[in-house]
Image (spheres, rainbow, N blue to C red):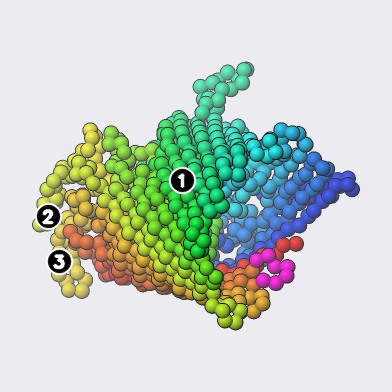
Amino acid sequence: MQKGKPLLIGAIVLIGLVAAAPLAAQITIGGTTYTKFLWGNQRDEGALYNFTTVPGEGYGDNGQGTEIELLVNGKLSKKLAIQARIHSRFNQNFWTNYGGFGGTNPAFQNDGQQTPCIGGICGEYDPRSNQYVKLRGVALTLTPGYSWMDTAVIGQQDWGYFDPFVVGRIRYIDRDNQGGILLQGSAANRQLTWDVARISLARIYQGPGFTTGTFVAQDAAYTTQMKYIVNPQFDIGGIFNWIHDVEIDPADKNFDNGLNLLTRYRNNVYGLKAGIHPASAVDVRLQGFYSSTDTNAAFAPTNFCLTGCGYSPVIGGHHTGWSGKADVDLNDPFGMGLSFNLQGFRIGANYSSLLAARRESDVLLTEGHDAAFAFPGPSNASYGVFGGNRTRIGYGGWDGPMQQVATINVDNDFTDFDEPLAETVIGWQGVTFVPVYSKGALEVSGEASYITYDTNWQAFNDASRSIMNTDYPTTELDTGVNHSYRSAFAPFQDKKTYIGVAKAKYTINAGKGIEIFGKVKGIHETDNRMNDARFLPYQAGDCAGGGKACAGNKNSYSPGNTTSDLYGNPPVITVTNPVTGQKETGYQWKPFDSLSDDDRKLNYWMINVGAGYQLTNDLYGSLSYNYYHANLLDGDTAMQGYNLHEMTSGEHRKNQLIARFKYNIAGLSECGLEYQYNWGIFHPDFGGGYVVQYASADVNKNLGFPVGSPGFTGRFGGWNSLLDRNFDQQRLKAYLKVAF
């Protein structure tokens, strides 16, 4: 029996049981269909989503597909209701699959190799392409009528209504996959409300190393929250979450009296919140959270390396941390349409809540970084110095500014370019001021933010350990124009960020009203990274130059520990210029012999202008232009993007022309289209101190740079080109959603 069939049969049985309920029951069966059309000149067709980082999953900018969900709601009595949904997925269910028939069975290849199921090639042999459906969101809701309890929900549901710092939203396509038990109640005429929940942990990612281990049935989170409205001017609340991930004790061999359990991972989070509302024009909100996290090294990873293996949704070992923010809103205090929002915030480096919101939440007032630059390389490609790691989302990145989430477990997988992108703000601390002026058809707003970082440290704040062995997952590390969206930690950091925004919107009274809008945004950021000479990898004068090999006299910042493990010395090479025939002898890359070798300095500007108009009674359209300009120093060839990523030091100029349309007629839930043309140039500037090399046939084959073009080969064999890189990306997404 195919993998999807048991779920489908179960879903049909559920519908049958509901349909067979007593006539007094109120049964509703509805649903939605969603159709998507992707087109782009990257010519990727691995899946019907633009982006993923999940190993073995596809991504693409071309294809058409449709998904459906059936929504079942049953009111069985005044005190009992059920709900469920049956949902297919886009994934690789292209129209070109012809209904999911045929395909390549990955288990039976003539060459004996297992072919990855990407782009729908496995057809009916893979649930991602055989048009399977899943049973999701099955829950029973009891309304017992007790004075102390309002409702009890048993089953799968969206748990995002707790708090994004503690228990928040997950991926929208999996929103109600998580099961548990929720009790809700109130007292004192609902001045006091409370929620208590037990949430079963997802075995595939909600634990250290993106797993909950081998024994999973009892892994759960226990959450409670309370809010008390003292009076209209004051309210107070609290929240607590305890996560317990357990494993069977391997030393317990006595099966006669049951088996003992040991803790694999434990995470406690405590929170307090207060709201002060002295007048309609004044609102003050205070929040504070404290966390502790413990990982058992016998069952889970407690340390991570820097070279491509630093991935986990939580930090390792034992840590405690805190986060908090204070918001003050002044709503038109002078009666002239001018309001003010002020926020102070701190999200500690060691603050850790495994179930905090992963996306679709925004815990800070600041715009943060722009999603057009979201991954390390100039084209949004991670590990791009190595073959086979071309950009996935593409040069244009995602639309708009990023949302901020208080976790390193950030999730932007299975998204398209027009969806909001989330970035981690673990370690951020600072202040944001936002004035807003609104009068008639005019709205003007701005932002001024200053951000420093609780992750400003040297050697991960523990010089007794090797930087290659840390409690902190570093993911793609912190290189790139706007860093990687999920990288919170780096071995050396001394960073400050300034963000300024001014934007305006005005409706011209002509025809049906022409909406014009614009925005200017600037970011200035400095990061001295390594700022103490005792951490330099080699002793002073180790590389004398003049064609002489480096001596290799390592510098230890503590007994047995040296940064030369990361920043090894270059060999001496002789290179012949293919055009002039001249030979040059020197270092393959610059020796890391100065604290300035890893310095970062960013001057970034973004300008947006556009207009929108109601073209017909049913069709609204807008046209906008974005210009991005970044002058960036992000280390020289001694640092070389932590040896893993394309270097981005130099000048970046990116242009975006965007056309958007939305169509609305009776019966359509959503219908729209976005077309983008992205073009620009990256002019690299990697400094000096090394011999320019020239691309080989292998570089041309693996990375596409012309044979004989200038660049250099790094420590791990990756290639960084010195050519000006001209980018040109077109992409389109059209979508149609119908509810019935």
- Is residue 141 visible to us here? yes
Residue 583 is tagged as 3
Please report whichever mark, 2 or 1, sits nearer to the chain's N-terminal start: 1
308 or 172, which lies in front?
Answer: 172
Q: Which residue is drawn at 51% across and 63% down?
A: 337
Q: In this view, does 402 lie to the left or right of 185?
A: left
The residue range painted magenta reads 664-670
Q: Which amino acid does label 3 sit on?
A: Lys
Report x, y in % for residue 25.
85, 47
Q: Mark 2 points at which residue?
A: 545
Q: Which residue is drawn at 77% across and 50% down?
A: 73
How far apart are labels 2 and 1 at the CA level? 54 Å
Q: Name the residue under label 1.
A: 326
Q: State yes or no: discs 2 and 3 in contact (Cβ < 8 Å).
A: no
Q: Residue at x 82, y 42 (%)?
A: 78
Report x, y in % for residue 230.
60, 38
Number of the front mark, 2 or 1: 1
Within-10-Å neighbours for mark 2: few <14, some 14–19, many 20+: some
How far apart are labels 2 and 3 at the CA level? 16 Å
Against 659, residue 532 (above or below) is above
Q: Which amino acid does label 1 sit on?
A: Ala
Q: Is mark 3 on a helix, strand or loop?
A: strand
Please report whichever mark, 2 or 3, sits nearer to the chain's N-terminal start: 2
Against 122, residue 623 (above or below) is below
Please report whichever mark, 3 or 1, sits nearer to the chain's N-terminal start: 1
Q: Which residue is drawn at 89% across and 48% down?
A: 23
Within-10-Å neighbours for mark 3: few <14, some 14–19, many 20+: few
